[in-house]
Image (cartoon, coloured by chain):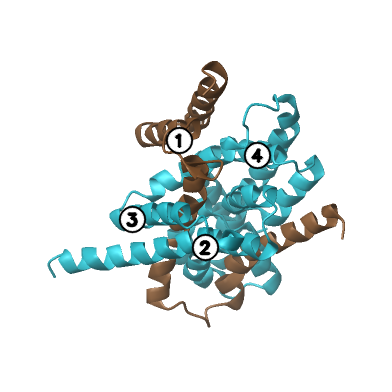
Chain colours: A brown, B cyan
Amino acid sequence: MSEGLWLWLTLLAIGSTTILTRGSFIVAGERARLPATLQRALRYAPAAALAALVAPEILLDGGEFTALNPKFAAAAVVVLVCLRLRNPWLPFIAGMAVLLLLRKGLGW
Amino acid sequence: MNASFKRGAAEGFRAFLPLSIGLIPWALVTGVAMRSIGLSPLEAMGMNLIVFAGTAQLGTLPLIAAGAPLWLLVLTALVLNLRFVIFSAALAPAFAGYSRARRILSSYLLVDGVFAILSERLLKAQDPHWRWGCYIAPSLWCWTLWQVFALVGILGAGALPADWSLEFMATIALLVMLVPMSATRPMLVAALVGGLGAVLARGLPLKLGLIAGIAAGIAAGFIAERQAEKRRPA
């Protein structure tokens, strides 16, 4: 199968998870109910998943654990900016500025 | 279109407008990030229309880039989207009596912001016309903003230098979502355990470390919540 077709199938598969989760109860109607314990546990899924995606990205360098690297420094600045300021643009500007400064400016 | 539909639409739109402006940087970044892993403008726009979920799009991009197996991509997207099951269950009574086509369209359009700002109003409102206006107007506005600014990002990405580590924008976007989410202690525990778990389990085959980290994070958050309840005097 060609790579292009495979990608479109992948996108459709990812897209089907969005429509299935969003539509789960809206389409099924009020007949269905979500068990309370499951509902409580599911609340933690997005935070756990976001962190599990981000942490290896900023803590690993070429598969090796490296706490001090440019991406980690940039991520730390992003977290600080998010905690201190409510501006939607600044985290992106500050994070990219730190990363580019460390990589290009200082050659880290 | 009757008068109560219009009143509902106006109220929903006005309530959602301030928050929706915050979507613009997201959509731009998502557009740039999709191009940064090598998707063509057509493929990137296709993803934006088919998936229409910033978190699932940004979260699966590094896995697509790494050539991860399809089941892992789907499982990751599913976990990132699980919150929608909760939103969908909470909001379902507001769609009582609507046609199947309307429910499916509403499902495709369901986003965090509209749910957060309007769910209370939607569940309280008795008039089905008012409710429909109040849901569909801000939802369509959000969809339009997302598509337009993602397209700007997709087309603008080509003008940015290739060696600027633009794929890091996706990581920043995920962090920006994660920080406010981790405001309570059990959520913070879920995030810390999920993140460290994924790093420690990275040696597992088939990128299973990601799934292991997520499962550990969910369990840790749930346990932390139970602990906090026990400590609280009844």
Counting labels gives 4
Mark 1 crowd level (few <14, some 14–19, many ≥20, 10 Å Cα): many
Report the residue marked by disc 4.
B33
Determine the image quadrant of residue B25.
Answer: top right
Residues packed near mark 2 inside 10 Å, few (<14), some (14 to 19) or many (20 plus): many
Q: Residue at x 51, y 59 (%)?
A: B209
- Residue that mark 3 sits on: B189
CB within 8 Å, label 4 to label 2:
no
Q: Nearer the viewer, mark 1 or mark 4?
A: 1
* Residue at the spot 58% in from the left edge and 51% down from the top edge: B59
Query: Relative to residue A19, is residue B100 depicted above or below?
Result: below
- How many angstroms separate mark 1 from mark 2 (CA)? 22 Å
Q: Distance between the residues labelled 4 and 2?
A: 23 Å
Q: Position of residue B70 (x, y in %)?
A: 69, 62
Query: Badge 3: few (under 14), some or many (20 or more) residues near its Cα, within 10 Å?
Result: many
Q: Can residue B19 be seen in this view?
A: no
List x then y, in percent, for residue B15.
Answer: 49, 46
Label 2 chain ID: B
Q: Which of marks 1 and 3 is in front?
A: 1
Residues behind callouts 3 and 2 on a single chain: yes
B203 to B95, vertically: above or below:
above
- Residue A99: x percent and y percent? 52, 27
Query: SS class of the residue under badge 4?
Result: helix
Is residue B13 placed above or below B28 in the rendered structure? below
> Where residue B211 is drawn, which disc sits there?
2
Question: What residue is shown with label 1?
Answer: A72
Residue ranking furthest to the bottom: A31
Q: In which quarter of the image is the N terminus of chain A?
A: bottom right
Query: Who is closer to the viewer here, A105 or A41?
Result: A105
